[in-house]
Amino acid sequence: MVTTLPALLSTLLYAFVGMVVFVAGFFILDMLTPGKLWQEIHQKQNIAVAIFSGAVAIGLAIIVAAAIHG
């Protein structure tokens, strides 16, 4: 299977845009929730917040992947 350069570049572009949207969505979630998510997860070892953040991350990743896939 031979991959053409335009196909490779478009794949990398979509991957980069997807990661940027994912990170932006996670930061928006952090701003909308009370407190700091990373501090709750890392310093306070709050498992409920970690599970919630993971579930939101998976949901956001599915949305971004569906938007890119079409």
Image (spheres, rainbow, N blue to C red):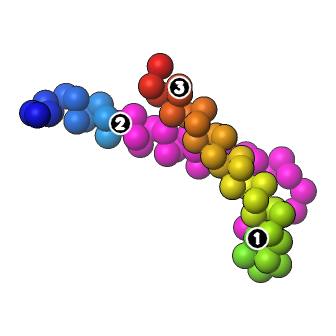
User: In the picture, residue 69 is in which quadrant?
Assistant: top left
Q: Is residue 21 visible?
A: yes
Q: Name the residue: 22% across, 36% down.
A: 8
Mark 1: which secondary structure? helix
Viewer-side residue, 17 vs 63: 63
How far apart marks 2 and 1 lie (CA) works out to 31 Å
**Kind of residue at disc 2:** Leu
State which quarter of the image contains the N terminus: top left
Q: Left or right: 34 with respect to 66?
A: right
Residue matched to label 2: 13
Residue matched to label 3: 67
Return the x and y of residue 66 as percentages of the image width and height.
Answer: 53, 27
For the residues labelled 2 and 1, say whether their Cβ atoms are less than 8 Å apart.
no
Return the x and y of residue 16 as percentages of the image width and height.
Answer: 41, 43
| Lower position in the chain sequence, tag 3 or tag 2 | 2
**Kind of residue at disc 3:** Ala
Name the front one of labels 3 and 2: 3
Asked if residue 38 is among those painted magenta in the image, a careful observer would answer yes
